[in-house]
Image (spheres, rainbow, N blue to C red):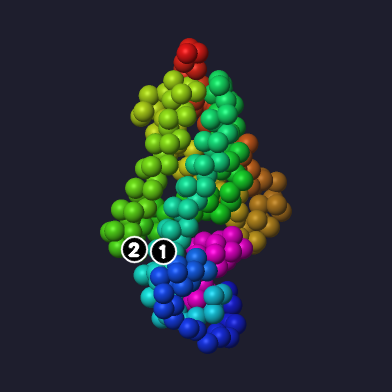
Amino acid sequence: MMSSMSEPAFQRARSAAAKQAREQAILEAAHALGRRHGVRDVTLTDIAAAVGMHKSALLRYFETREQIFLALTADGWRQWSADLCGDLAGRARATPAEVAEAVTGTLAARPMFCDLLAQAPLNLERNVSIESVRSFKLVTLGEVERIGRELRRLLGLTESQAFDTIATATSMAGALWQMATPGPRVRELYLSDPRLGHALVEVEPRLTRVLTAYLTGLGTEAPPAG
């Protein structure tokens, strides 16, 4: 548990607006804790303490800690997609390398989202209701389709190629972020032994190289100008 702060008196939200405000406060607290400590180390008790309520009261708003972080993952997809599509939409033409740089740059700028991308299939989707999973997947699907349209426009990808590109980028971003952020003791080990230095990776350059090679290997090229 991250904090043992005393919990101030909690007033249950009585209106829809108050309930929404309380849910937003919970999400913001979870985001701050996750970014500071890593998602897997944040407990429901930590989140409850950060917003000044008992864990049992928090469960009136979210069924589990996993549901809280799954909601943050959905928000992360929306924000990343908006940023990336805004970048890509401003380009009349782009090379595979330029698209790879845009994708990886917008992912690397969101370390918390990269952490959530790794955690979602591992555990966040496994301790929530089926309806929570359905809602999350529909959000993800919508954003994948939105990004995919820009990839098809710029590089002439097929629908399946665009889907695979996004899946490759997001899954690798999650995995590489975990590799780039070992615990303090493990990091110290890597730094102390030159033979282990390769274990400390930088997310953006590694992902850019992989994604550039992948897109180049597809033999993609921009469609003729209309």
Q: Nearer the viewer, residue 38 or 162?
A: 162
Tell me, yes or no, if residue 34 can be seen here.
no
Q: Which mark is residue 130?
A: none
Q: Is residue 164 magenta?
A: no
Mark pair 2, 1: CA separation:
7 Å
Q: Residue at x 29, y 58 (%)?
A: 131
Indicate the secondary structure of the residue bearing disc 1. helix
Q: Residue at x 65, y 56 (%)?
A: 187
Magenta span dominant secondary structure: helix
Q: Earlier in the sequence, mark 2 or mark 1?
A: 1
Q: Disc 2 marks which residue? A: 128
Q: Is residue 86 above or below residue 193?
A: above
Q: Is residue 52 above or below residue 64?
A: below
Q: Residue at x 62, y 58 (%)?
A: 186
Stretch of the chain drawn in magenta: 26-48
Whether the residues at callouts 2 and 1 have beta carbons within 8 Å, the answer is yes
Where residue 79 sits: x, y (%)? Answer: 52, 47
Q: Disc 1 marks which residue? A: 66
Where residue 212 sits: x, y (%)? Answer: 55, 27
